[in-house]
Amino acid sequence: MGENGAGKSTLVNVASGNLAPDEGSVFIGGKELAGANPQLAKLSGLAITYQDDSLIPDLTVAENMALGVPTNMRPDGSHLDKWTADRLERFATTIDPRTPVRELSVAARQIVEIVKAIILKPSVLILDEPTAALTTSEADRLHSVLRELANDGAAIVYITHRLVDVLAIADRVTVLRDGQVAASAVSVSDIDEDRLVELMVGRSLDTTFPDKAVERDLGGVILDVRNGTGQQFDGLDLRLRAGEIVGFAGVEGNGQRDALRALAGLDRLRGEFTVKGQRVRQGVRAARNAGMTFVSGDRRGEAVFPELGVRDNMTAGSLMNLSRGGLVTRGRERAEIEQRLQSLDLRTPSIEHRVSGLSGGNQQKVALGRALLESPSVYLIEEPTQGVDARTRLQIYRLLREQARQGAAVVVVSSDALELAGLCDRVLVFSRGQVVAELAGDDVAEERIVGESALSAVTRAAADNQRQSNRLLQFFRRSDFAPVLLLAIAVTVLMIVIGSSRPGFLSTSNLSNLLFLAVPLGFAALGQAAVMMTGGIDLSIGPLISLTTVAIAGLTTLNAEAVSTATGLLAALGIGVAVGLVNALLVRKLRLQPLIATLATYITVQGLTLLWMSTPGGEVGPTFATNAGQLIGFVPLAFVALIAIAIAGEMLLRRRVLGFAFRAVGSRPAAARRVGVRSELIYYVAYVLSGVFGMVAGVFFVATIQIGDPTLGIPFTLASITAVVLGGMSTWGGRGSVVGAVSGALLLAVIANGTQFLQLGPQAQYYIQGGLLIGSIALYSLLRATGRRRDETINER
């Protein structure tokens, strides 16, 4: 135990191999852990669950589970979902193994994180704040499982701020304070809550809740909701008075969080909704303009901007109030921030310090500080003390009560019944999307809240119906293969339209030419997809294709075609691997942004190409062109090979751990490293693959033009990026389809070939490509954003 910032998380990272210790050693099972090596720690028998989890958001639950276990425990890909469901069953949860982790609630992600660690059957299990997002029943279930593990011989390190958890589950307790051991291996039977708190803060501390409001201190109604209805709740009637704190309770997934988010304008709310007598329109801006501020319980995902500083985080919602003539008044801004830092007891090296470098409790204070700076009439707060220490918890309680005394109204959603009982003046208990009990006065007690919440053990029946009715929408939003279907439709429609006006377009000879035209771009797209899957980009593909044509044509002579062609191909392969390695070194060793690194390579490779051959020249022998253009019927053999490689790559991404690792690195690099993915190797493989596939694209391109050309390959850079994005690849990494990338290349080939038949001129294909690119990005973004919160609620239980 220890306050936020006491050193618990740092200690965990050292023990698990994520950080190398400055001094001392880590031993697991009697063997020393050499340096920072998470994979070695795992192999030594250590498993860990992190407070901010180590799950990969763009992988499914099942894929995350597979990535986190050794090869000998991993099932065959076809049985992965069933294997995962069997492991999750131990927690009596109905989480769908096929659900992408990004669509799970915080609580559901925590359960998956815990199960992922427990199935390893570790000799040492470290849990960092395991119950922070869990309900009481889920926490009890976890404790039962932990007792079984301990009885079977596992050693468990349980890090928590919840004193009740320590007294319920622990044998001994060690307390950290300011990076030092304040008390070591104290028997829990010899200590109580007051003494634990005193050890954590270094002095005695009043652990009682602040006094609640009395009737005479309450003002008029600020927030008035009548028959409020949203996606997962209905019939909400709420009249909130100035000076009052109201809690929303219930078993997770019964509408209480949805109601809070709807009040904040994040989800749709129907019914009569007024603040200070004024009707509130839909949307976040309208809710904020009405004087309402929301603080999310998903701290890193929604509540703070992790990579920005404390100042930027705290003033993000009140810049208009701190500016004059459109410019922020720095003196006033600093004064306001310093005042909030003092009132919150927020510990940070400076106001410019990145929030990601603060402890969880101080991050929570930053989120609350931003809300305070906005001076709202209504605070909407989700899990106000989740993952914070006892001292910070009391500070937050007193802060919220003080805001109420100053005339604000507060709505709190919490999974901690004791917290609701001690903090709130009234508590509304939700069941199946409806308020089934309103507790006030002496009825606001932990046992009453838990008792009433027990009525809501089953989530709304409407959720299943909703899932059935929206399967098509879910497919287009979730599946990486939805863009492939859309591209197939687009290619079919284009070919029918062009073929109906130009019959020669659908002739076998033209179809052969069209498919062969798609081959170089298809291989370039495969290379670009490999890099973009890891969150990078490769601008050097175009010049690499030009250099490949120059190398092959320049080294091929009619007098010794077979020998010189082989030499040219080997040279091209060497060039492709070398360019890939240079890009990887620039990105990983020198830590350059992929855009900048590959732009530098682009310029260098293009310069070398022009140095070798400044104008088109050289010659490719007829045998080379004939071999490259071999047909099966009217289909080029090269196109068949392209499709086969794309399908094999897709199977690798979906069924093999190496593919999971590729997607993990692009989706969440830090978490990928935590679970033992060799991230550096993945990056190098991606860039080398891009170089090799760029080389292959150049080989088939030179077979088409049959001469070396130092500039004709350049357009392949943007074309390959366009093909990959049309195929649904995320520019941030982690999501996408190899088959989708090749499908995008095929569509661009149809457009290029079709515009020639229609005699529209070369500029037409660029107009069409640009329009398709913008349209596809807009469509994919819309589909993936629609109903995201609804699916979170459906899938979290």
Image (tube, rainbow, N blue to C red):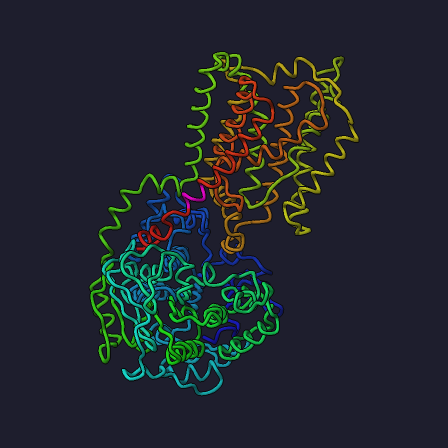
Q: Nearer the viewer, residue 788 or 579?
A: 788
Q: Nearer the viewer, residue 364 or 141?
A: 364
Coordinates of residue 624 in the picture (x, y in percent) = 65, 16
Coordinates of residue 291 in the picture (x, y in percent) = 40, 67
Relative to 526, say whether 215 is above or below. Answer: below
Q: Indicate whether residue 239 is drawn in magenta.
A: no
Residue 224 found in image quarter: bottom left
Coordinates of residue 46 in the picture (x, y in percent) = 47, 60
- Quadrant (top left/top right/bottom left/bottom right) for the C terminus: bottom left
Q: Nearer the viewer, residue 609 or 476?
A: 476
The reply, left or right, for residue 594 in relation to residue 205 is right
Relative to 143, say whether 705 is above or below. Answer: above
Residue 115 visible from this viewpoint: no
- Quadrant (top left/top right/bottom left/bottom right) for the N terminus: bottom left
* Magenta-tinted stretch: 780-784
Relative to 291, say whether 561 is above or below. Answer: above
Q: Indicate whether residue 783 is drawn in magenta.
A: yes
Q: Residue at x 47, y 31 (%)?
A: 647
Coordinates of residue 358 in the picture (x, y in percent) = 54, 68
Residue 347 visible from this viewpoint: yes
Residue 145 found in image quarter: bottom left
Q: Majority secondary structure of the magenta segment?
A: helix
The reply, left or right, for residue 657 in relation to residue 560 is left
Number of callouts in the render? 0
